[in-house]
Amino acid sequence: MSSSEKESKSSGRDASGRGSSGQGASGKGSSGNGGGWSERTRARSKSSLFAAGEPMVWLTGGALAACAFMVAGLLLLVLVKGLSTFWPASVIKLETPDGRTYMGEVTREDLYRPTDNVLADLDGEIARKAALEVEEKEGWAFRRLVRTGNFKLTQNHFSWVNEWEVAEASEPEWAMVLERLEWGRFYGFPEAFVLLTPISERTADGQGRTGEERMAEALGLVEELAGQGAEVQLVDDRFVNGRRGPALVDPAESATVQDLQGVAQVFRGPEQAWAKFQELHKESRQRWHDRRRLEKFDTGKVNHKQEEARLAVRELELELEEASGTAGEPDVRTRLADAEAKFEEVRTWADREFTRIRQEIDAINHENSRYQILMRTAGEGTRPEEQVLLRLDDVVRAYPANRLGWVDKAGIYLSRWSEFLTDEPREANSEGGVYPAIFGTVAMTLIMSLVVVPFGVLAALYLKEYANAGPVVSAVRIAVNNLAGVPSIVFGVFGLGFFCYVVGASIDEVLFAANLPNPTFGKGGLLWASLTLALLTLPVVIVATEEAVSAVPNSMREGSYACGASKWQTIRRIVLPRALPGIITGMILAIARGAGEVAPLMLVGAVKLAPELPIDGLFPFVHPERSFMHLGFHIYDVGFQSQNSEAAKPMVFTTTLLLIAIVAVLNFVTIAIRNRLRSKFAGGQF
Amino acid sequence: MKTDVNASSASEIAVAVKAAADPNDPIAAISRGETLPSEVHKSLADEEAVLDVKDFRLWYGAAQALYDINMSVPRGKVTALIGPSGCGKSTLLRSVNRLNDLIDIVKIDGDMVLNGDSVYGPGVDVIELRKRMGMVFQKSNPFPMSIYENVVYSLRIDGENRKSVLDEICEKSLRGAALWNEVKDRLDDLALGLSGGQQQRLCIARAIAAEPEVLLMDEPCSALDPIATGKIEDLIESLRGEYTILIVTHNMQQASRVSDYTAFMYLGRLIEYGATGELFTRPHLKATEDYITGRFG
Ligand SMILES: Nc1ncnc2c1ncn2[C@@H]1O[C@H](COP(=O)(O)OP(=O)(O)OP(=O)(O)O)[C@@H](O)[C@H]1O
Ligand SMILES: [Mg+2]
């Protein structure tokens, strides 16, 4: 029995290996031979279903199909969601019989099972419609999630609206979407464009002015502007519907003014307002960017200079402590005095600079505050319609959603993508761009590759080419392979404990002592994150390199030795070039693994919002000690740490798409390099 | 491993047949555990030796592969090593340029002398030694680089980077290996793109580029078709006189065609060594005759 079983097994292997041709051959053989031999052969050829190999084909094929299905499904989900996020939706206005209104973009639609409690709470017309719908759909009901925005007014961004509540659904022509720097989106109708002339609170010589004086000036301005065509109104900061904000007041009612802001020329009507908005929006934003640059770069530069001078003083103070009592003390004292004088100098200069920058910023602010758009809400929920004045420079992007054609929509789509790719995040990362995160991800991955590849390759070369095979080498190899199985968060802990707190802290003590107790390298940062990930991906590179090196035919090495080459020459000129494609394969795997890793980064330097990029215009230009943003961490942060998670959800997909795209691009580049090398070094026949 | 078993069982048969017939038969002596000295023809005494192998013994771990080899390779001549598979021809050849050092388990005893310099003596610089020899392997092993770089490899590792020198030597070596006309327009192409025969001639060009004192060839034609084999034999013919060549071959015709001297090895011993013409037509030993007439091996 056992022998026949063995035979049937081996024939099965044959058949599955060689396919149908193998079977045909064995069939022919059996007819040619005589007697018991032929019988046994026949018994083999049809012994079992497994012998034919069919089930294995189905099993392997099925496994592949399942994998492909899951991977494709994931990619498709990310792709569809990620690509559709930025497409501008139309704005819908839903009105209920009991006078509530919801206006905004529909972000989701679904069927759900309303509980009896919900249905019992309804009354009147709505209860009737609800009962009807639920009965018709056999217990299910349709609802929409409407992004109603206007958070400052309503304290929420989204509202679920049941179908049974909707008496009327429309897409108002002039419904506009305003993406703002703060407070999320605003939905409403443009009422008017407002060109404001502020009334100063101070006289030219800096004295405060009374309310009467300011009002007199305002009324004078009203007179002056009245002839210029547009309607003239006063702007007052007052409480409207329980909320304080700028509002327009007829000059005739000047007695009711509480906190005069200025005089406004008002261009009424949606067409005029929208036209004026388009005309002036770009300039306002440009000025805003100028202001931002002043705040960030110019201020940063001055701060940097000042900090440098302070550190110089601090360094000498430390030196003095050490030198006190020795011969060098007087010298240090004089240098310290010099540095202190220099610091004073820099400080007065910095103060001057700050005042200058402050003034420039104020001027820009003053100019920008003049351009405002008056919007009317649709009256969210039970609230009545309200008028809101919005500054143009606060609006990132605005468009009348329902008036757009395909081309306009495509334009907005592209402008959102370009903002996403090139701008900084805003609104707690749920809006705006991810440029710093892209930068951080790519920089970290590159540094990681630069570290891990040489180290991994050298280590693998030693293991394969120099070390004598033995228990030590085996132990090292096992350790390296097991490193790949250590949870990545453990690498994070190690990175924090070793790189940041030991290495970084030592560097600080030696090189940046003046800055202590503020850590420079002794905290999470780009460099430490890269090194941690390099450690994490080291096994991948080592294993790949070992394999690639083993695959170099020994005959080549012997040929090289026979020519009189030393071991290193042989490795450098023969083994490495030949193994390079395999090494690069390891690098590709390492990049894919490293770029997508998040958990360890949280401990060693990835942050929610990094104020500065690791490369900038301030000496020494590259700052590997700075914490950085990372797309993977960004996904986690936006998706799970965000207050406005519903609004952030689409960003999760877009960011994921971007991360996948970046990893793919990095991989394609390396694959292209590898293919070039492969055609250069390998191939051929042996 | 398997060849070993076959060889020893063949020898047992031979022993059974001839042991009684010829007490001087080396094969019978081996099976008795004795060694008879190699039969070295007188003609060799007139030759000036480039390489002298002296009482050379070699072990792979516990298994001895070479027994007391004494052999001098004459200058400017082609010397063929023949013998049944597994008799130690490659081992002997690889011992000359100390390639066997790369195998950890190899132990040796005895010495060789190359132009007066000890090969295995203490303090010998193996790398310098190998630079004085060229080697062509059974399987062609061009390096993963261009044809040009392959040829000038040994100069490059010596740090020679002057283009004019390299160009000159490249052309000379390729002409010497009868490959120049075929590749002169594509010197920068990958060597791996050449045909098998061209690759082997490229390896020869590489081996002669450094003008070696001895050229070692281990069955250089075994993977080639008759035409390529013919080209390489012509090549060996043209190198004769200029280079000292030690060539391993399984092909009796080839040995008789290309070599001046032939050494017959068996079971790790050098059995008979003499001028090719004499060895093939009037071998002194019966065992040699049996082998070259194909009666065993
Ligand atoms: N690396 C090795 N380790 C152990 N034994 C070896 C090794 N190489 C060769 N041998 C043994 O040494 C003996 C001589 O081998 P060698 O390769 O020199 O034979 P050969 O004469 O070249 O044979 P062939 O004509 O088949 O090439 C054989 O018995 C072989 O098994
Ligand atoms: Mg051999």
Image: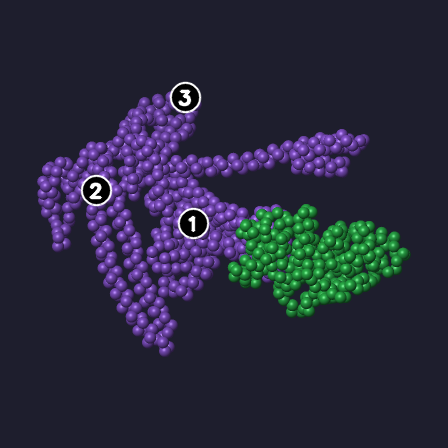
Front residue of B274/A377: it is B274
Q: Amino acid at mark 1?
A: Val
Quadrant, the N terminus of chain A: top right
| CB at disc 2 and ligand 1 closer than 8 Å | no
Q: Amino acid at mark 2?
A: Tyr
Callout 3: residue from which chain? A
Between the C-alphas of marks 3 and 1, the distance is 54 Å
Chain drawn in green? B
* Residues indicated by labels 2 and 3 sit on the same polypeptide chain: yes
**Residue A366: percent from the left, percent from the top?**
20, 47
Return the residue at label 3: A136
In the rendered structure, find residue A371 and report the number of the disc placed on it: 2
In the rendered structure, find residue A442 and report the number of the disc placed on it: 1
* Residues indicated by labels 3 and 1 sit on the same polypeptide chain: yes
* Residues indicated by labels 2 and 1 sit on the same polypeptide chain: yes
Chain drawn in purple? A
Between the C-alphas of marks 2 and 3, the distance is 53 Å
